[in-house]
Image: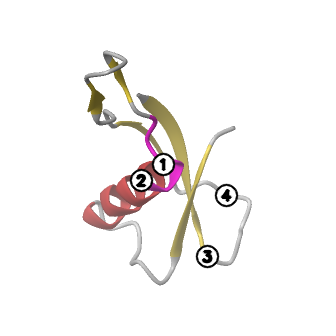
Amino acid sequence: MKRIVDVFTSDWSPEIIGTYIISIEGIINPIDLNHDQVDLRAFELEALRLAQDEGRGDADNLIAKVRG
């Protein structure tokens, strides 16, 4: 499952400091032969991790939102 996630500073400035395409696979459900849905917060946390690794800010100064 893929989602586009925008990262902002925590002051809610309208400027996007980073956009990420995050791909996370759900847990395989053998009964339905399908993947379970992944919580959207997991995509946001991964985008925040990537932004921190790239030096765009620290956890206290960044927020992430999945595009709807």
Where disc 4 sits, the SS reads loop
Give the residue pinned by disc 4.
15
Give the residue pinned by disc 2.
42
For residue 11, above or below residue 63 = below
Q: Name the residue located 31 percent from the left edge and 21 percent from the top edge.
A: 31
Three-letter code for the amino acid on which mark 4 is drawn: Glu
Question: Residue 50: x and y, percent?
Answer: 31, 56
Give the residue pinned by disc 1.
39
Write the start and end of the magenta stretch as one range. Answer: 37-41
The reply to whether callout 1 and callout 2 are in contact (CB within 8 Å) is yes
45 drawn magenta: no
Answer with left or right where residue 19 lies relative to residue 28: right
Name the N-terminal-most of marks 2 and 4: 4
Q: Name the residue located 39 percent from the left edge and 78 percent from the top edge.
A: 58
- Total labels: the figure holds 4
The reply to whether callout 4 and callout 1 are in contact (CB within 8 Å) is no
Name the N-terminal-most of marks 1 and 3: 3
Q: Which mark is residue 10?
A: 3
Three-letter code for the amino acid on which mark 3 is drawn: Ser
For residue 7, above or below residue 31 = below
Question: Overall secondary structure of the magenta stretch?
Answer: loop
Q: CA distance from mark 1 to mark 3?
A: 22 Å
Which of discs 2 and 4 lies nearer the camera? The answer is: 2
Q: Name the residue located 43 percent from the left edge and 29 percent from the top edge.
A: 2
Name the N-terminal-most of marks 3 and 4: 3
Answer with left or right where residue 6 lies relative to residue 1: right
